[in-house]
Amino acid sequence: MSILTTQSEAFLEKYINNASPTGYETSGQKLWLEYLRPYIDEWHSDNYGSAYGVINPGKDYRVVIEGHADEISWYVHYINENGFISVIRNGGSDHLIAPSKKVNIHTKKGIVKGVFGWPAIHTRRGADANLTPKLDNIFIDVGASDKEEVLAMGIHVGTVITFDDEFSVLNNRYYVGRALDNRLGGFCIAEVARMIKENKDELPFSLYIVNAVQEEVGLRGAEMIAQTIKPHVAIVTDVTHDTHTPLVKPKKIGDVQGGKGPSVTYAPAVHNKLLDLIIDTAEANKIPFQREASSRRTGTDTDAFAYSNGGVPSALISLPLRYMHTTVEMAHKDDVENVIRLIYQTLLRIENGHNFKYF
């Protein structure tokens, strides 16, 4: 039986469809807080827009559950005299998928529509027969006659751009859309808060539900919010690669498959005793899970929390995702629900002042 409600899934669709590019997450944060507010006791935000709700505030022991809010995007970098726009990345945007994609250009006057153009196959002859998209040759066409018309639309160097793609469900099994990385993480932790409220669980600690900004450009939001909250424990949820699709090598990237449960990561930043608690919880509650290892860093907000404040016991619970950093990211519905279950059940096993010291 699904743990998600009709209201939950309506929020998810609205949340995914909203644009929250790195550095411009405010509208998404407002949607998230609007949904979260009935399930928390108070909420706050910091100077750069990371938002968090608190359940059972004022306790000496503080536990964080976190997902990052931002999505990859583009910046206007150059506008030529004919009105065509060159771009640079804002986060890890993939230039290879850009040609033929529709875009939303976010100006102070509102959304301007555009497309990533590309020469027709008929015109790519001779040396251009094998022309491939590169960061320095992709471009956006807004149908303008010249640079002055582009500027009059409110578009200028530094204007942020997102792909124009909407949420859907494939085969009643997979959520599909752009920015599932990591809006699904924000969704999962909000659902944990909902379950705590609806089940009337009494937590012996203060729980901080954190939706941090600027993960895609170096974990910056988590770095800042960790210093503000100063947690004693942090459980981070993010996405990981479903490696069971063509052209991806499980032996090289890791053996993780959508539909087989969340993945837990072994890495220097991951606290072994907290990880053991998560695995014990999964086994006790018959929640399927997978394992992967990171040799140096997880590349997620786990690293930022773990190495803050003299060291915070931190762990990572990841959601398998197909086609990361594309407009058709795919996540299995069962995995989403099991991420929620695993975080929720783990929280119920953390005691006030839980000692994660090794000796």
Image (spheres, rainbow, N blue to C red):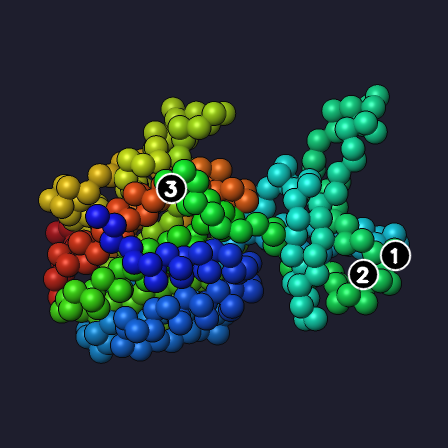
Q: Is residue 158 left or right of residue 177?
A: right
Nearest the viewer among 223 and 53 is 53
Q: Residue 59: x, y in percent?
A: 19, 75
Q: What residue is rendered at 80% in x and 53% in y?
A: 143
Q: With respect to residue 232, does 2 lie above or below?
A: above
> With respect to residue 164, does 332 lie above or below?
above
Where disc 1 sits, the SS reads: loop
Which of pointers 3 and 2 indicates the residue nearer the eye? 3
Q: Is residue 253 visible?
A: yes
Residue 23: image tag: none
Badge 1 or badge 3: first in the primary sequence: 1
Residue at which label 1 appears: 146
Which residue matches tag 3? 172
- For the residue marked with disc 3, what is the amino acid? Asn
State how far apart marks 1 and 2 are (Cα): 7 Å
Q: How many marks are shown on the rendered structure? A: 3
Residue corresponding to mark 2 = 150
SS at circle 3: loop
At a point 48% along the width and 65% down the height, the residue shown is: 28
